[in-house]
Image: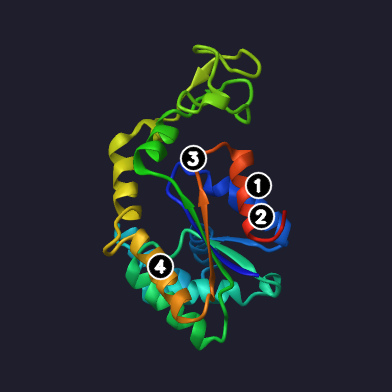
Amino acid sequence: MKVLLFGPNGSGKGTQGAIVKERFQIPHIETGVIFRENIAKGTELGKQAKAYIDRGELVPDSITIPMILERLKQPDCAKGWLLDGFPRNLTQAQELDKALKKEGIQLDYVIEIVLDRQTAKNRIMGRRLCVNDNNHPNNIYIEAIKPNGDRCRVCGGELKTRSDDQDEKAIDQRHNIYYDDKTGTMAAINYFKDLSKRQGGVPKIVEVNGLPGVKEVTQELLQKLGLA
């Protein structure tokens, strides 16, 4: 089962991706990890990517896509894969589609976790970490996991925030790219939706409402994937 996963920062995409990975028994492929592995191993593509990164420049698609394809052809991907974090824009969507077709790889599902921009931002900025256990869920903007005042809802421990969760400018920059439906990530999603219509429903588009709680989102997702 070959899957693309989309969702804005703050949508719970990582959580749902982990669940899909387990249910389908496929590897969760993240572009950041691919970069790090290629650079660490000193591959030719890794060396090229590192040169751009060291200059503070974006790694071009001509390097990124071959890296991704190489990863998707590894033995652990024989039964499928879940690709997360790519494509991020329309051009990358077009190039990825072209590259997959050239390799004879058919995309089965495109999953989109739909969440409005303000809610996504609130969820990021509302996260609170328990000093006793980071796995205790606390978020001042989510009713089901609201902390007890300034204390952890699970154990009563002290709560703190992550600095990057409070960096409003950085959050807005990431969301500017994601919610851009002309050239950004939303444009990439729409590209695959149009592709699906032209190809008789392949890949299958699965839209999931990201507003409810984690369990409800998971239930809807698994039902639409035929896994419930």
Task: Give the structural element (helix, strand or loop) at label 3.
Answer: loop
- Residue where numbered disc 2 is placed: 223
> Compared to 101, does 197 lie above or below?
above
- Residue where numbered disc 4 is placed: 49
The Cα–Cα distance between marks 4 and 1, rounded to whole angstroms, is 39 Å
Q: Amino acid at mark 2?
A: Gln
Whole-percent x, y for residue 98 in the image: 43, 82
Q: Nearer the viewer, mark 4 or mark 3?
A: 3
Of residues 218 and 72, which is closer to you in this image? 218
User: In this rendering, would 128 be left or right of 153?
Assistant: left
Q: Residues within 10 Å of mark 4 (few under 14, many from 20)?
A: many
- Residue where numbered disc 1 is placed: 219
Q: How many circles with numbers are drawn on the protein? A: 4
Asked if disc 1 and disc 2 are in contact, CB closer than 8 Å, the reply is yes
> Compared to 2, does 150 lie above or below?
above
The Cα–Cα distance between marks 4 and 3, rounded to whole angstroms, is 37 Å
The Cα–Cα distance between marks 1 and 2, rounded to whole angstroms, is 6 Å
Q: Earlier in the sequence, mark 4 or mark 3?
A: 4
Task: Give the structural element (helix, strand or loop) at label 4.
Answer: helix
Work out whether residue 60 can be spotted: no
Whole-percent x, y for residue 224 in the image: 62, 58
Q: Nearer the viewer, mark 2 or mark 4?
A: 2
Q: Amino acid at mark 4?
A: Ala
The Cα–Cα distance between marks 2 and 3, rounded to whole angstroms, is 17 Å
Q: Amino acid at mark 1?
A: Gln
Q: Earlier in the sequence, mark 2 or mark 3?
A: 3
Task: Give the structural element (helix, strand or loop) at label 1.
Answer: helix
- Residue where numbered disc 3 is placed: 211
Of residues 113 and 127, which is closer to you in this image? 113
Q: Residue at x 58, y 17 (%)?
A: 152
